[in-house]
Every structure is written in C-alpha cells, then in structure tokens.
Image (cartoon, rainbow, N blue to C red):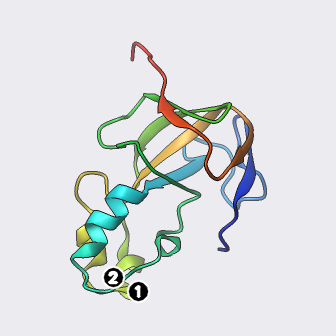
Amino acid sequence: MDPVTHGILVTGQGLLDSADQGGRRQVTLVTRERWDLATQSMGVPIDPILRRANLLISGIDLENTRTRILQLGDCRLRIRGETRPCERMDEAVPGLQNALDVHWGGGAFAEIIQGGEITAGDDVRWENNPD
C-alpha cells in the first residue's frame, strides 16, 4: 500500500483501483489525532500507513458516528461502523492492537454516497443529518 495525495471516490463502490469495492465497507478512514494518541504509548514513531486505511483525515472525531455523513471535499460518505484493529497490528508493533482498540482508534468504514475527486488537504466536516 503506497500513500498518495489524491484519488477518486466512486459512488456505491469505494476508492478507484482499491481492492475492496462495493458493500458497506467501501472505504476505511483513520484520524491523525486518534492514531497519534494510540501510538504515543508505543514509545516509537509509527507511520499510519501501517494501519492500511484508505484515508487519513484530521480535525474530525469518528467515535460513535455510525450513520453520520462526512463531507470530504465535494464527496459524501456515510459512516457504517468502527474498523476494529486486527492481529496484524501486533505483528508489526506488539501492543498496537490494544492501543487502537479504544475510542474507535482503528478508524471507521463508510460507503460512498456522492463520489468525486479527493486531494490531501480537502475540507473534512460533518453534514448536519437527522440520523
């Protein structure tokens, strides 16, 4: 998995050219803030690419946001649930799985309800939705 600064989100599918397409888990997100908080206790810097999430965002808290709509640039994503960290995290750094397993530290998964192009630095905010 190589980091990129732009991509295309396809409505109802996910990130263009990503292995996972369709279903409710079309894209995965992790926040810089939760990643940094969880990994501080590890005692070594850990690159968020290790998490293998599709998107690294900041300025937004994902905890308990199931059904909320996130606007990323001109795109809209419906959060469907928490992405739980797996044993691969511990294979990379012992203790990382547990460190990420609180407050949605492993991120969230979402479906794309309005696709488009995204670029690093795009505005990220919650849409006011009644759900």
Q: Is residue 41 left or right of residue 44?
A: left
Residue 51 is at least partly visible in this image: yes
> Which of the image's four quarters has the N terminus?
bottom right
Q: Is residue 116 above or below residue 104?
A: above
Q: Is residue 88 left or right of residue 18?
A: left
Q: Quadrant of residue 32?
A: bottom left
Amino acid at pointer 1: Ala
Q: Is residue 36 left or right of residue 77?
A: left
Q: Percent position (x, y) of residue 58?
A: 45, 50
Which mark, by number, is residue 122? Answer: none
Distance between the alpha carbons at the discs numbered 1 and 2? 5 Å
Q: Residue at x 38, y 87 (%)?
A: 91
CB of mark 1 within 8 Å of CB of mark 2?
Answer: yes
Q: Percent position (x, y) of residue 27?
A: 59, 49
Q: Which residue is mark 1?
A: 92
Q: Residue furthest top?
A: 130
Q: Which residue is mark 2?
A: 90
> Which of the image's four quarters has the C terminus?
top left
Q: Percent position (x, y) of residue 10?
A: 75, 40
Q: Is residue 15 above or below residue 91?
A: above
Q: Percent position (x, y) of residue 6?
A: 73, 54
Residue 100 is at least partly visible in this image: no
Which secondary structure lies at badge 1?
helix
Which secondary structure lies at badge 2?
helix
Amino acid at pointer 2: Asp
Q: Is residue 11 above or below residue 129?
A: below
Task: Tell me the crowding category of disc 1: few under 14, some 14 to 19, or many 20 or more residues within 10 angstroms, Cα based.
Answer: few
